[in-house]
Image (spheres, rainbow, N blue to C red):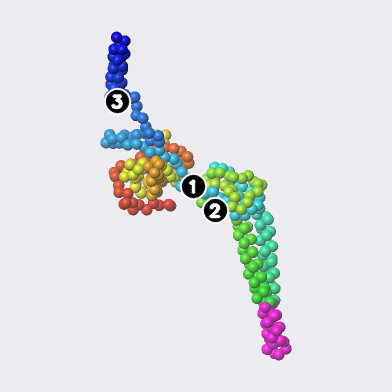
Amino acid sequence: MKTRYRLGAFAVMFMLAQTLCIFPQCDLGFAQESPGTSSNTDSNSDGSQSSAVSSVIYPFRSATVGTEVRGVLDTINYKEGDTVTDGAVVAEVSKDRYTSIVGEFRSNYEAIVRTLDRARELATTQEELYRGRAGTFDDVMKARAEIRILEARRDEAAFKLKQAELNLKACEVRSPFTGVVSVLYHEPYEAVDNLEKVFGVVDTTKVYARAYWPEARLSEIALGKKVNFTYNGKVYSGVVEKVSNLIDPSSRTKRIHVLIDNTDGALQVGMSGALNPVDRTRVSQTDQSYAPSVD
């Protein structure tokens, strides 16, 4: 009797297990996204849904400017956040010392030039004496050799003077373009070495919205195509200016740059927003004849 009861209980449990394996998993009530997938959507005019692609604002141009000479920072003429014009002197490095070096090399060069002029006069005199049989050919050869030596010394002095003048010019660390000082790496009276960073400058009159566009939606993007960048509910219009030729195999995306006018300074570097094409008409990736302007 007990044996039959055990066999019956085992059969019921076996049938119950088979029943549970047949039914699919229940709906949890929300979509489960894979890692790295964006779920932001916007409604199109035709009622379809299209995912917005997140993007970050980058400057149109940026540069980290260093010094070509070593010395001590005499002055820094701007603060972080100040606007600088193209060619403005942002900092000066040991300018007095390099000015004196230029003076030294210039005096040396001028002294050699005067000595060379005198040697040429003496050589002319020796040649006249030789023609008048009042001098020897050996004296003429010595005078000519002295000229060649002095000419070599003059060329060497001219090279050193030119190098000193270049170093003096490099003492003034200038902005390569009009923009805003983004960072200062040193304070006045600090020592700096050759090619050491002094300041950073960014041009944000235009900005780039950089995004990684999904491979499945590359037909929506082409050079010159209008794209909207949305930040805090406000929409900024731009055009696709750069599209990478490479697809990231891990994320299956392409990096794109959308150029946006920012003369009012509303967009700041580092802001995060979303990109959406104005026209989602599919385009051929082989027909990209747009020539972007960098004015």
* Residue found 30% across the figure and 36% down from its top: 44
Give the amino acid type for the residue marked by disc 2 in the picture: Gly
Q: Earlier in the sequence, mark 2 or mark 3?
A: 3
- Vertical comparison of 110 with 228: above or below: below
As drawn, is 33 to the left or to the right of 148? left
Who is closer to the viewer here, 187 or 81?
187
Label 1, label 2: how far apart the Cα atoms are: 14 Å
Q: Which residue is mark 1?
A: 203
* Residue found 62% across the figure and 63% down from its top: 162
* Residue found 63% across the figure and 51% down from its top: 193
SS at mark 1 in the image: strand
As drawn, is 228 to the left or to the right of 4? right
Count of marks overlaid on the render: 3
Question: Pointer 3: residues within 10 angstroms few (<14), some, or many (20+)?
Answer: few
* Magenta segment, prevailing SS (helix, strand or loop): helix
Q: Are marks 3 and 1 in contact (CB under 8 Å)?
A: no
Label 3, label 1: how far apart the Cα atoms are: 57 Å
Give the amino acid type for the residue marked by disc 3 in the picture: Pro
- Vertical comparison of 185 with 140: above or below: above
The part of the chain drawn in magenta is 119-145
Residue 40 in the image: state x and y as whole percent: 37, 34
Q: Which residue is mark 2?
A: 87
Q: Earlier in the sequence, mark 3 or mark 1?
A: 3
